[in-house]
Image: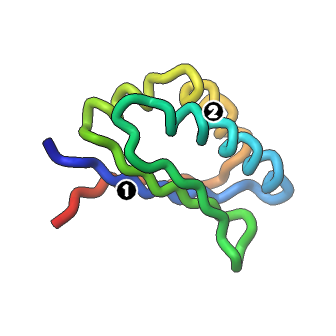
Amino acid sequence: MTNVVITAVLKAKPGKEAEALAALQEVVTPSREEEGCMTYQLHQSLEDISTFVFYEVWKDAEAVQKHVESAHYVTYREKAAELFEDRTVYKLAKV
């Protein structure tokens, strides 16, 4: 099995930075508690407070799939359209 590393870069809409941060923080603890989650870290840019980055490591692709289907993640994604103007997700494998 190959671990899956995910880096997600999110850009909050102007004036929505605090609300975006709160929404992102709500998914951290339940995501860390999911089976197959090895690392789940949220970061905020020091240069641009509207930019957030998730660094995640999952046991395998099945764990990632269960994560995106989880209730807390689905709830977050429903809010995301109102809060973020851009979202880029990279699924990575160590080489």
Q: Quadrant of residue 93?
A: bottom left
* Residue found 55% across the figure and 30% down from its top: 73
* Residue found 81% across the figure and 46% down from its top: 19
Secondary element at image label 2: helix
Q: Quadrant of residue 47?
A: bottom right
Frontmost residue, 1 versus 73: 1
| Residue 12 x/y as whole percent | 70, 55
Which image quadrant: the N terminus? top left
| Residue 72 x/y as whole percent | 59, 26
Q: Amino acid at mark 1?
A: Tyr
* Residue found 43% across the figure and 50% down from its top: 39
Secondary element at image label 1: strand
4 left or right of 53 in image:
left
Which residue occupies the extreme top position in the image?
71
Return the residue at label 2. 76
Q: Amino acid at mark 2?
A: Tyr
**Residue 14 versus residue 4 in the image, above or below:** below
Return the residue at label 1. 90
Classify mark 1: residues with Cα within 10 Å, few (<14), some (14-19) or many (20+): few
Which residue occupies the extreme bottom position in the image?
47
